[in-house]
Image (cartoon, rainbow, N blue to C red):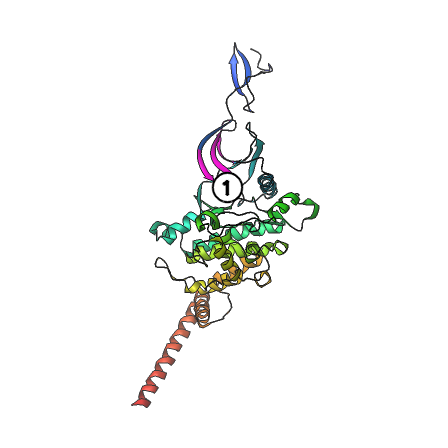
């Protein structure tokens, strides 16, 4: 048989893209079957705009996540969906889920094919830590949670460097993989700034999101304040910045993402949200605008030690109400975090003073162990002599 024979293509349908090879009478034929390309395996999540399913891609032979838009006739939903696709397409980073494909289903709905992420949301992890789950506390001690904070900062720093702000940073939009990898998801509210003509057109979406929506004050936290909102409160109320809560979109920039990250990190480290659990959206927005967070050092959890004082002050700066009083950038916020965990933090109270002295002593012991030991012995002898003289004078 001639091995150089050109294979025939016999089409049987349009549901798949790649054919399979079969032999008919000794002749190779490439057959495109009439099977559907995607088979839904399980539902991964559902929101107001769409649904995400775990799907088997028969053509490529892998599991993927497919996000389907529920209402493709709603202009606002379509623009947000398009914005997410374009932002994801321009942000190539290990911490940002890549886009595999985008298309229009047979029923007229838009869909987005993405990499399937194995793991859990930061929201689920915080809930287990808050409940005192021993395995979770063993796997995610304070230093591991600090690593997660740093990873999120690197991802947002990358996006900000390319002029993209997320605008909906919250625990449910941060994924923790099975091997500790960190991914920021759901870029549906993302917006490009300071890029000029290179940015996707947001004119219609901006007009829609700035319209006046009526937000019922009798909605509960679970049904409204922990979900993404559009309209005059763009974002998720519990994690939005004061400028988002007040509808000041003219000043909305990278500082707003920094505030939201501060809120998420505050909850991750202290296991308590800084405004508690308000019962309605009006109270939530008022608290976001006017309620200052208690220093995380003073938040007591029965399941862990206090948040280190240097991290508490770092969080406090990230969550200042005025944008200009926060960190200048995600890079600065990350650098200050690294300085804090490295012992190079400002002395602003007796606790930070004692922590700084202790860290300096530890560093000295690592670099000059013998000299440190002699200094400690001399200090102990001096203190003992002083105590003995005081006792003699008293007697």
Q: Which is nearer the eye, 156 or 151?
A: 156
Q: Position of residue 374 (x, y in %)?
A: 40, 74
- The span picked out in magenta is 42-67
Against 214, is 336 above or below? below
Total of numbered circles in the picture? 1
Say whether residue 192 is left or right of residue 359: right
Q: Position of residue 308 (x, y in %)?
A: 43, 63
Residue at the disc numbered 1:
48
Q: Position of residue 304 (x, y in %)?
A: 37, 58
The crowd level at tag 1 (other Cα within 10 Å; few <14, some 14-19, many 20+) is few
Q: Position of residue 382 (x, y in %)?
A: 38, 80
Inspect the magenta stretch and tell me whether residue 48 lies in it.
yes
The answer to whether residue 214 shows anywhere in this view is yes
Against 48, is 238 above or below? below
Against 339, is 347 above or below? below
- What is the chief secondary structure element of the magenta stretch? strand
Q: Quadrant of the N terminus?
A: top right
Q: In the image as oriented, which residue stretches furthest toward the right?
A: 197
Residue drawn at point x = 39 percent, y = 50 percent: 127
Q: Which is nearer the eye, 247 or 127?
A: 247
């Amino acid at each position: 048989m001639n091995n150089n024979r050109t294979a025939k293509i016999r089409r049987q349908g349009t549901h798949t893209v790649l054919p399979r090879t079969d032999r008919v009478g000794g002749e190779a034929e490439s057959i495109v079957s009439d099977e559907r390309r995607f088979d839904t395996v399980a539902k991964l999540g559902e929101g107001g705009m769409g649904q995400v399913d775990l799907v088997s891609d028969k053509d490529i032979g892998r599991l993927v996540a497919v996000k389907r838009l529920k209402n493709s006739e709603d202009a606002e939903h379509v623009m947000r969906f398009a914005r997410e696709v374009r932002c994801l397409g321009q942000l190539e980073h290990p911490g940002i889920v890549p886009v595999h494909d985008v298309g229009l289903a047979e029923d007229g709905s838009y869909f987005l094919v993405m990499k399937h992420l194995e793991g859990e949301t930061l929201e689920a992890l915080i809930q287990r830590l808050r409940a005192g789950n021993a395995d979770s506390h063993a796997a995610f001690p304070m230093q591991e949670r600090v690593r997660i904070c740093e990873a999120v900062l690197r991802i947002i720093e990358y996006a900000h460097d390319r002029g993209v702000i997320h605008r909906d940073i919250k625990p449910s939009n941060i994924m923790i993989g099975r091997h500790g990898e960190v991914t920021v998801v759901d870029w549906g509210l993302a917006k490009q700034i300071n890029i000029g003509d290179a940015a996707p057109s947001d004119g219609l979406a901006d007009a829609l999101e700035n319209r006046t929506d009526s937000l019922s004050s009798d909605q509960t936290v679970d049904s409204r304040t922990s979900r993404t909102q559009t309209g005059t409160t763009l974002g998720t109320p519990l994690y939005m910045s004061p400028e988002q809560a007040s509808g000041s979109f003219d000043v909305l920039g990278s500082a707003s993402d920094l505030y939201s990250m501060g809120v998420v990190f505050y909850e991750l480290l202290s296991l308590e949200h800084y405004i508690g659990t308000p019962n309605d959206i009006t109270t939530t927005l008022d608290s976001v605008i006017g309620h200052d967070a208690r220093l995380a050092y003073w938040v007591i959890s029965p399941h862990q030690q206090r948040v280190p004082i240097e991290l508490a002050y770092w969080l406090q700066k990230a969550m200042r109400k005025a944008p200009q009083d926060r960190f200048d950038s995600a890079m600065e916020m990350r650098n200050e975090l690294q300085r804090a965990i490295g012992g190079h933090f400002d002395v602003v109270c007796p606790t930070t003073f004692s922590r700084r002295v202790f860290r300096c002593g530890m560093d000295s012991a690592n670099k000059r162990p013998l000299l440190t030991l002699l200094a400690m012995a001399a200090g102990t002898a001096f203190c003992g002599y002083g105590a003995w003289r005081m006792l003699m004078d008293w007697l």
